Amino acid sequence: MSKIIALSEVEGRSWGYWLLLGGLALIIGVALLAAYYMESNGHYVTGMTNQIAWGTPHVFAVFLIVAASGALNVASISSVFGRSAYKPLAPFSGLLAIALLAGGLAVLVLDLGRPDRLIVAMTSYNFKSIFAWNIFLYTGFFAVVGAYLWMMMERRMNSHARSAGMIAFIWRLTLTTGTGSIFGFLVARQAYDAAVMAPLFIAMSLSFGTAIFILALVASYSWTNRPLGDFIVRRLKNLMGIFIAVVLYFTVVQHLTNLYATEHHGVERFILLEGGVHTLLFWGGQVLLGGLAPLALVYHPATANSRKWTLAAALMVILGGFAQVYVIIIGGQAFPLALFPGMEVSSSFFDGAVNQYAPSLPEAALGLGGVAIAGLIVALAVKVLRFLPVTLADEEVDPHHMVNTNLHK
């Protein structure tokens, strides 16, 4: 039987804490100025064009939204699958999920060009569009996870936590399926138009979310001088390794499926061989940096038990994840539309030409603002509410700690 671990707020009185808040607020301020600059001058000041309408802000937004679903995985393992070792981490998992989704949606709204058009999206629905479905999925996620947190953190409601956890688990899988289906349903883009996009995005969410959770957890306990044993970090590391492998598997399935169909040979040759920066990001960023390298660090005997290398692997997963989302979103738009399949098309309107895109500084600033919003929400929430366990030392959370200690004597 696991011990009951108390939760507590963070004092947040140190200069380091206020410096963190100030730095995050500054980044958010710069992001708002960047959004105002792009809205006032038009998107011609960005790298986006009529051919590539989803730019770097969409890369950040989709990454954060997908990671939000994965960050809730720790709470799901506790409530749905009954793993008591993760129970003390469940509230922090829910908080991180809400924060990441808020950051991603903030970027998405500010990248609309006309943020006030969001009112139209929220009041007029075309249910043939996956975007209309996602309005309900995203807003519902806040409500479902918020209720789940209430059930976990309010003692008299604890008996309902498992049921709320099951609903949240199903909802986050549906949300990630919806996000992946945005691309899977776009039949006009040859790089998309694949049913495998939904399970691929679910796998990506688990990998990205777990990596972010590991970094956030270790940083929180390091900065607050709270005990964090190797047991929890090691289990999270092993989970991340499994998810990395699953992402690589679905990536292979995606490209092998496209290579099987002749109509997709062109886009596959573009992404895998001739796409310039997109090919470099695919092999160097997505496959090597975000897949094979962290997988080796997680399971190689020389690095598997090192917290330093675990953090390095988590950071690699995040960087590789950004590369993967960039290749999916930007690379998918860069390849020309097949207006007349089987025929070469050339005109003064870029028909048949590879579309060029270079991220601008305002786009990058807006994207980083979303990350800062997520960080600021977490930093403020842990100060005012009891999200973090007082201790995660091995002797408190590892049920086999005394057995292992006696074996080493």
Image (cartoon, helix red, strand yellow):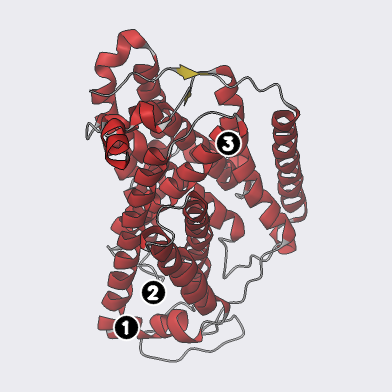
Front residue (pair 111, 372): 372
Residue type at the position of mark 3: Ser
Which of the labelled discs sits on residue 211, or is there none?
none
Residue type at the position of mark 2: Gln
**Quadrant of residue 353 in the image?**
bottom right
Would you say the residues marked 1 and 2 are in contact, meaning their CB atoms lie under 8 Å apart?
A: yes
Front residue (pair 149, 62): 149
Give the residue number, with chain letter if any, for mark 1. 263
Q: Residue at x 45, y 49 (%)?
A: 211
What percent of the width, then of the height, locates residue 300? 38, 64
Question: Quick one: label 2, few (<14), some, or many (20+) residues within 10 Å?
Answer: many
Q: State which tag comes first along the sequence, 3 or 1.
A: 3
Residue type at the position of mark 1: Glu
Per the image, label 2 sits on a secondary structure element best described as loop
Q: Residue at x 47, y 30 (%)?
A: 95
In the image, residue 126 sits, relative to residue 378, either above or below, namely below
Per the image, label 1 sits on a secondary structure element best described as helix
Front residue (pair 291, 221): 221
Which of the labelled discs sits on residue 222, or is there none?
3
In the image, residue 358 sits, relative to residue 149, either above or below, namely below
Q: State which tag comes first along the sequence, 1 or 2.
A: 2
Give the residue number, with chain letter if any, for mark 2. 190
Q: Quadrant of the C terminus?
A: top left
Residue 129 is at least partly visible in this image:
no
Alpha carbon distance from label 2 to label 3: 46 Å
In the image, residue 98 sits, relative to residue 155, either above or below, namely below
What percent of the width, then of the height, locates residue 45? 75, 62
Q: Quadrant of the N terminus?
A: top left
Alpha carbon distance from label 1 to label 2: 8 Å
Q: Is residue 2 left or right of residue 296?
A: left
**Closer mark to the observer between disc 2 and disc 3:** 3
